[in-house]
Amino acid sequence: MIDLTLIPRTHDLGGFEVRRALPSRHKRMVGPFIFWDQMGPGEFITGQGVDVRPHPHIGLSTLTYLFDGSLMHRDSLGVTQRIEPGAVNLMTAGKGIVHSERTDPVVRQHAHKLFGIQSWLALPKSHEEGDPAFAHIAKENLPLITQAGFSARLIAGSYEGLASPFTFAHDTLYMDVHLQAGGVFHVPDNAEERALYPLSGRLQVGDTVYDAGQLLVLTPHEAITLRAADNMPCHVMLLGGAVMDGPRHIWWNFVSSDKNRLEAAKADWLAQRFPKVPGESEFIPLPAE
């Protein structure tokens, strides 16, 4: 039932750990998901925090989902939005957008935590050069399914007649599932590609038990049941969707079906032709080739 197990690459950002499962040389995408970073869990001392300076994107949507802590999002559309646990921030780059993510100065006045998932969703070819956009969906507006043995928040897609208000240009499934000790969850089969990412506890799929912190790519169209192993709770993310309409190329923060478009984006950033983020003055140079 598991086609592929991906072990994330780990990066230490000044004492704060980031684990990247996608893209991998073994698997580039799961549905539209082309980038998957687990941020933390980590704790910052007083005065410290995240400072992701203004940087550009094309051809994708960023989806930020937190479990603990907060971040302040600012972008070149003029949007300022606090990202908090359980809510969804979806920023669509299209033909080009610039954004920053920072810890709010008020939060820096005391020790604080941060834990969440930052993912990128590749845009279908028909939307790659569309207008940039931003959407925020509050936690209370995302369907919460509570049944014997588990609870699940439906971030994107549908589950047993419920539909998320999250709208995206490509068929997408995304769920935040909490299995109670001994709990069972039947993975919906309404997505062509599916993967699991256990965040805590141990997850049993069939007769095999998996530790947290790895991406488990599921066999297509297979009926799959999850169990919380060791008579302990398990927290797992379910992600996937329809197969993307062709391969995608990634360079730095740019995604496109056309390699020439990546070169044009590099030139535009160097020439500072991307729009600016109001209130931000820092400029990140292109990384070395």
Image (cartoon, rainbow, N blue to C red):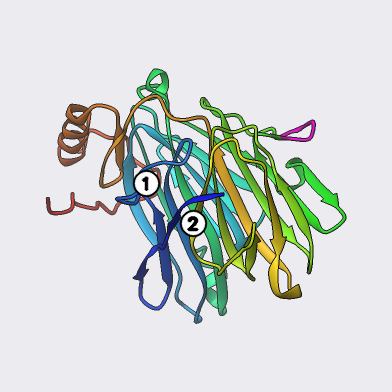
Q: Does the rendering let one see residue 84?
A: no
Residue 35 forms part of the magenta stretch: no
Outermost right residue:
148
Residue closest to the eye, 194 or 268: 194
Q: Which residue is mark 2?
A: 215
The magenta region covers 159-163
Residue 162 forms part of the magenta stretch: yes
Q: Quadrant of residue 101?
A: bottom left
Residue closest to the eye, 229 or 19: 229
Q: Quadrant of residue 261?
A: top left
Disc 2 from disc 1: Cα separation:
10 Å
Relative to 176, does residue 124 appear above or below in the rendering? above
Mark 1: secondary structure: loop
Q: Residue 184 location in percent, x, y?
A: 77, 56
Q: Residues within 10 Å of mark 1 (few under 14, many from 20)?
A: some
Q: Residue 136 location in percent, x, y?
A: 61, 40
Q: Residue 193 location in percent, x, y?
A: 52, 37
Residue closest to the eye, 255 or 204: 204
Q: Which one is earlier in the sequence, the residue at label 2 or at label 1?
A: 1
Q: Which residue is mark 1?
A: 27
Q: Is residue 63 left or right of residue 127?
A: right
Q: Is residue 268 left or right of residue 126?
A: left
Point 42% across, 64% down: residue:
19
Q: Residue 12 location in percent, x, y?
A: 35, 73
Point 31% across, 34% down: residue:
248
Q: Amino acid at mark 1?
A: Lys
Chief secondary structure of the magenta portion: strand
